[in-house]
Image: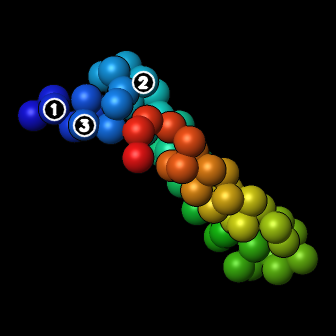
Amino acid sequence: MFSHPAEVCMTYGEHAGLAINFTGLFLKGAALSLIHAVLPDLFLDTTTNINRRIAYLLETKGCH
């Protein structure tokens, strides 16, 4: 059950921290996307930037 962190070259704590960071980014993206849906002139680039941040973290954390 706890073999996945080692498979991606992370400790349990590192993996948990990264997953929690993703959770925060996803929640922020969801909230701001909802606001953008109602008020399209707000948060024009926010979800794109969040997606780029997530992609960067996935590319640079752990082993590949």
Numbered label attached to residue 14 = 2
Mark 3 to mark 2: distance in Å?
Answer: 13 Å
**From the viewer's perspective, is residue 26 above or below residue 61?**
below
Is 58 left, or right, of 34 in this rendering? left
Q: Residue at x 74, y 59 (%)?
A: 49
Three-letter residue code for mark 1: Ser
Disc 1 element: loop
Q: Label 1 neighbourhood size at 10 Å, few (<14), some (14-19), many (20+)?
A: few
- For the residues labelled 3 and 2, say whether their Cβ atoms are less than 8 Å apart: no
Q: Residue at x 71, y 79 (%)?
A: 37
- Asked whether residue 5 appears in the rendered view, the answer is yes
In this orientation, which residue lies closer to the viewer: 5 or 44?
Answer: 5
**From the viewer's perspective, is residue 34 above or below residue 28?**
below
Mark 3 to mark 1: distance in Å?
Answer: 6 Å
Mark 1 to mark 2: distance in Å?
Answer: 13 Å
Q: Which residue is mark 1?
A: 3
